[in-house]
Amino acid sequence: MINGLVKYYVKRFDKELDQVRYQTSLCQNEQLDQILKNDLVLQLNPEVEGLSKEIDFKSQIQISTYKKYEERIAQLMRQNDREIEYYAQSSGTTSGKKKLVPTPESFVRANHLRGSWYTLNTLYNNVPSMNVFNAKNLLIGGAIYERHKNYLIGDVSGIMLNRIPQFFRPYYVPKISEAILPNWKEKLEITVNKASKSRDISLLAGVPTWVITVLSGVQKNIHPRSLSDHWPTLKAYLHGGVSMDPYLNQLKSLIDLPHFKFIEIYNATEGFLAFQDNPDENGMLLMTNSGIYFEFVRFDDFDSEGSEEILGFDDLELRERYVLLISTLTGLLRYVIGDIVEFVSLSPYKIIVVGRISEYVNAFGEDLMLWQAQQALMNTADKYQVGLAHYSIAPKYISVNEKGWHDWAIEFIQAPNDIESFERDLDQQIQGINGNYKQKRFNSIAMNQLKVHELKSGTFDRYLKSIGKQGGQSKIQKLRNDRSILDELLNLNHV
């Protein structure tokens, strides 16, 4: 009965989503107007007082980062404002420093909750016989870390789990109180145990790395049955947080079901930004009506001491790389979220995330970006028919005695038989994708061929545990211009 009511309810969003798709300017003008009048925005940005027009906003508000807001947010927390019910905590993937974003219930409703309903709309419209609330949903999400008198601190997925209404809670595995536990080891054991006993899972959700960890644990418990036999009602997987590409083959080997759907969502700490409204088409639809005002800077022009040209939707081009700026009802204005996106459609506006602005290697002028490394690795892995769990890349800098190169630390699910041949082909793949890398590698004039270090199973998990970041939303930076992560991974590999 509940499933039927929910299915009927989400149909009401069809018309609203058509407005998101085809009336972008109208939606965005409404959002900016609401943002400039919002009390929390004014608290965190006194300079906004009196700005009521788009032209004033664009001429007077500068690009910002978390540094601008850090002390102002700390002051809000000290004031213990009753109107800010949540503080969403970032995983600190790139900077290593966790951030807290004030997230009032009003923004949860306008943004995160709306994104959840939109995602259900996608499920019911695109997945045959979808029964989200006739079966169980296996969620591997974040945690609630602190409970204060007037507010909670947690991962954004933990916050959303915590506020699920009681009458929906029986449809989730594990119990919500267990799903938001901050102790990842305890939560993992509970989740694997309860998922192993449940026979009616219909939906998976979570970061691919941790979903694979849970599914692998369940597979061991139910052997010799397959997951497909154990969960015949399984229909779809909602994923986000990291690119699915390195994990897709492994997930497909674990879940061998016809018509199974992978649906990507872009629900960041700062807001629910986009979702895949059609699982059979590449790209996520930007949520232009949900408390966020979007702007863009060409990636090639970014970080030029404030002289970047800030672009609107009318200025965008297909397959150009852009740094994403957001202004939201949480108080962040022209905020650099850190992601690099490309548009795969301009009508409607659909994006893919291709990297992070701080996730690159450029030790020799090669300017290797995440999307290039990932494409090269996937092409090579497909050729050798190997499975990948995790990887991280860092430069080996030039010394007196030898040229430098790129070190790749890779944790394989199934390693190649000939690692040296794999290295050569991976190096060739990168040369074919990145002209700067090819130039530096020509006759090894500026750098030597890359080296692959095969890591033992579980090495990345041990690293996350060692830095206190093991959990449902935690992930490792894949490209760094220094060796702080890679050397530690190599050290752990020899323990």
Image (cartoon, helix red, strand yellow):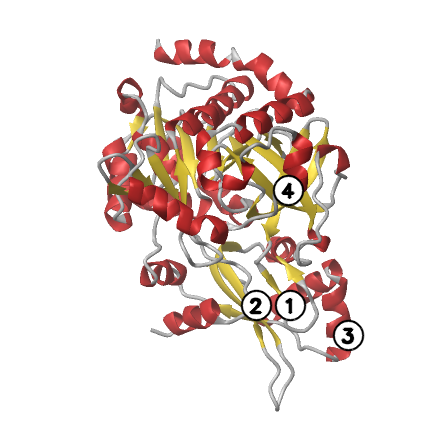
Q: Is residue 450 above or below residue 124?
A: below
**Mark before the other along the chain sequence, 3 or 1:** 1
**From the viewer's perspective, is 135 left or right of 272?**
left
How far apart are the alpha carbons under marks 4 and 1?
A: 34 Å
- Residue drawn 29% across the image and 36% down it: 151
Residue under label 4? 60
Label 1 with label 2: CB-CB less than 8 Å: yes
- Residue drawn 69% across the image and 62% down it: 430
How far apart are the alpha carbons under marks 1 and 2?
A: 6 Å
How far apart are the alpha carbons under marks 3 and 1?
A: 17 Å
- Give the image location of residue 272, x and y in percent: 50, 33
Say few, some or many: other residues with alpha carbon within 10 Å of mark 1 (under 14 / 14 to 19 / 20 or more). Answer: some
Instruction: From the viewer's side, name the closer residue of 216 and 350.
Output: 350
Residue under label 3? 442
- Give the image location of residue 99, x and y in percent: 41, 49
How far apart are the alpha carbons under marks 3 and 2?
A: 22 Å
